[in-house]
Image (cartoon, rainbow, N blue to C red):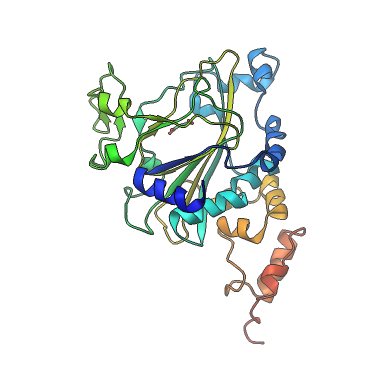
Amino acid sequence: MDLESAALDWRADGFVILPGFIPAEELTAAVSELDLLFPSADGFHDGTDPRRARFIGDEFAGIDTFPFASTEISLLAVNHRILALAQALLDDSDVHIYTAEAWAKYTGACDYDQDLHRDYLNHTLLVPSTAPGCQQLEMFVFLSDVPEELGPPHLLSRAHTADIPAVPNWFLRPGQHSAWRFNDDSGSPQMYGAEVSGAGPAGTVIAFESGTFHRGTQLTASRGARYSMHLGFRPSGLSWGQRVGWAARSFEREWGEFVHRASPRQLQAFGFPPPGHSYWTAQTLAGMALRYPELDLTPWSASASAPRGS
Ligand SMILES: O=C(O)CCC(=O)C(=O)O
């Protein structure tokens, strides 16, 4: 599917599923470093990997956050195809990444089946908007094949949900009861009956707007493992769409290793000012050369303005 058709689907449904969007040759380097973050399926299920305990009993305990122990996985979060997709769907040439997580799930480790929900309560200070320029984009990127028995996310088209108000946000599966105002416990058979599965091969990208209903599903395959990334993008000026501040971990070795290998476009997605921006002067370039000694500063120095007073 081309980016224009993807944008049409995303506008109509609130999501688009792109099977194998990242080709194998652009995925291999990241996949080959998954062991820097997570146990293999055998390591988990045979109990030979001492890291396995972390995954038991809490689905969210399987999440690592950017910058990752693998630079290849960090670079994949802002792969050129992913940035082009974000630009096309958000209709903006200056998109920023506001969250990047890598997630491992293992059959039997815990309950991965979720209730239908939107993610906006921890992706924005406000509520989702349908106005052009005011939308946030999330992506699930599969680092391994995710057939139905390995717990693909299920999503619900906006055609079924456009009139649902911002609260409640979780529509519980039948048989559960809750008095919390963010939960709806009516069982919602029409919503669950209209789910679409995001199952697909490694490299599949599921792009969805932060107001789109979706849910995680159970891993049932014997000795199964699922590896994915969960990314968030916003137009650079959309200051209310947040999850982390990248500078908080920018003193870590993994961040430096990412910066040294990233392109100017990839760094711009994390908030580096683009070439030509008034930030770039002889003074800031000299400092950047000390902070990031292996970063080629040519793209920014070529357009740098003269220091004040010169
Ligand atoms: O990982 C998945 O398949 C979906 C997870 C999800 O929707 C969530 O945790 O909000």
Vertically, is 4 above or below 64? below
Vertically, is 308 above or below 187? below
Whether residue 188 is visible to the viewer of this picture, yes or no, is: no
Whether residue 288 is visible to the viewer of this picture, yes or no, is: yes
Q: Is residue 42 left or right of residue 100?
A: right
Q: Which residue lies at the image location 35% right of the left edge and 33% below the top edge?
A: 117
Picture coordinates of residue 284, whole percent (x, y):
66, 70
Label total for image: 0
Vertically, is 142 above or below 295? above
Looking at the image, which residue sits at the far bottom?
Answer: 310
Vertically, is 293 above or below 12? below
Q: Is residue 223 left or right of residue 152?
A: right
Q: Is residue 155 left or right of residue 177?
A: right
Q: Is residue 208 left or right of residue 203?
A: left
Picture coordinates of residue 65, whole percent (x, y):
57, 39
The quarter of the rendering in which ligand 1 is drawn is top left
Image quadrant where residue 298 sits: bottom right
Q: Which residue lies at the image location 40% right of the left edge and 25% below the top edge?
A: 114
Image quadrant where residue 235 sits: bottom left
Pick the quarter of the image with the C terminus: bottom right
Picture coordinates of residue 164, whole percent (x, y):
24, 39
Picture coordinates of residue 40, whole percent (x, y):
67, 23
User: Toward the viewer: 202 or 165?
Assistant: 202
Q: Which residue lies at the image location 22% right of the left edge and 25% below the top edge?
A: 179
Q: Which residue lies at the image location 72% right of the left edge and 49% below the top edge?
A: 257
